Image (cartoon, rainbow, N blue to C red):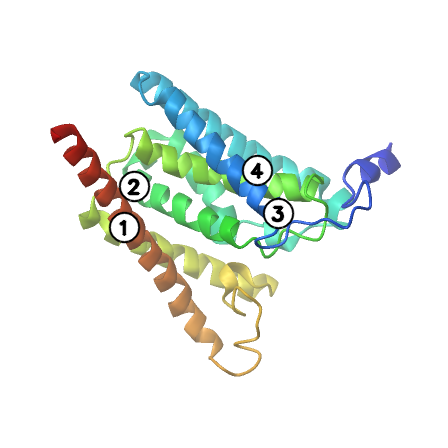
Amino acid sequence: MRNLFFKLFEMSHFETGISVTAFSLSHIIYLLLIAGAIVGLFLAFRKKTDDKKEKVLRILAYALTISYLSDFFVHDFVYGGLEMDKLPFHICTVLCPIVAFTQFNKRFKKFLEPVTMLSIVAPLMYLCYPASIGSGEPWCYQAVQTMFYHGTLLAWGILNVALGKVQPNIKKCYTSAILLVIITLWAKLGNILLEHNWFFLNEDAFYIGLVEGGIIPKWLLMVINPIAFFLTILAVYGICYGVKAIIKKVKKA
C-alpha cells in the first residue's frame, strides 16, 4: 500500500519532461483554467440571492482549507518528509486560516476587506510567477494541489468583490497595511525559529542572490516586501474604482 501511494504521488508518471515553469504552455493553460473558473462562477452567481452568493464563498473557503490541511498528510509521499514551505508563514499559506476565520466567524467579518485584498494580490503574484511549484509534470499531485490552492484563494478574493460582499473603500486601505505588518512580523518569527525563507525575508523572491551577493541588506526585505504588496493592493483599489466608473457610465448611456 505504501509503495502504491509513492507511485500515485510521484512527480512524473509518463516521463514527458514537461513541467510548470513560468510562462510555459502548461503555466498559461493553468492560468486560463483558473480565470475561466472564476469568470464562470461570477456569471453563474451574480444574479443569485445573497444567501447563494454567501454559499459559494463558503464552499470556496472549505475547499481552500481542505486542500491545505489534507496536503500535510501526503508530504512523505511527495517530498519525502515535511515540506517547510507549506507551513503557515508564507503570505499565501497563512491566509488559509485567516480566510477560514474571516469566512466562518462573525467576529472576524470586520476584517473582510483587508483579507479579501490580500487574497487577491498574494495568489495572483504567485500564479503569475510560480517559482516554487517544483519540477513535476503539470498533472502530478504537487502541481495540481499548488495551482488549485492558489486558484481557490484568488477566486475567493475576487468573488468577494465581484459578487458585492466587499465594497472596496480606499479610505480603509490602511487596514491592509496593518495586516501586512502583522504577517511580516509573523513570517520573521518563523524564519528566526525555524531558519527558513518565509515571505522571502532572508533572500529575494526570485532567488537571484540580492542578499547573498551583498547588493541589499537582509533587513531591507522586511520593508520592501510589505511595501510591494501594499502598492499592488492600491492598484487593485484603483482597478475596482475604475470598473465601477465604467459600469456607471455604461448604465447612464
Q: Earlier in the sequence, mark 3 or mark 2?
A: 3
Q: Which residue is mark 2?
A: 113
Q: Which residue is mark 3?
A: 25
Q: Which residue is mark 4?
A: 148
Q: Which residue is mark 1?
A: 175
Q: Could one spot residue 61 in this view of the protein?
A: no
Within 10 Å of the Cα at label 4, are there few (<14), some (14-19), or many (20+) other Cα atoms? Answer: some
Q: Residue at x 25, y 51 (%)?
A: 173
Q: Position of residue 87 (x, y in %)?
A: 58, 50
Disc 2 on helix, strand or loop? Answer: helix
Q: Position of residue 125 (x, y in %)?
A: 46, 53
- Choose between 158 and 15: the one closer to the eye: 15
**Does residue 84 appear to the left or right of 56 in the view shown?**
right
**Does residue 134 appear to the left or right of 161 in the view shown?**
right
Label 1 or label 4, whichever lies nearer to me, is: 4
Q: Are marks 1 and 2 in contact (CB under 8 Å)?
A: yes
Q: Amino acid at mark 2?
A: Glu
Q: CA distance from mark 1 to mark 4?
A: 28 Å
Q: Earlier in the sequence, mark 2 or mark 4?
A: 2
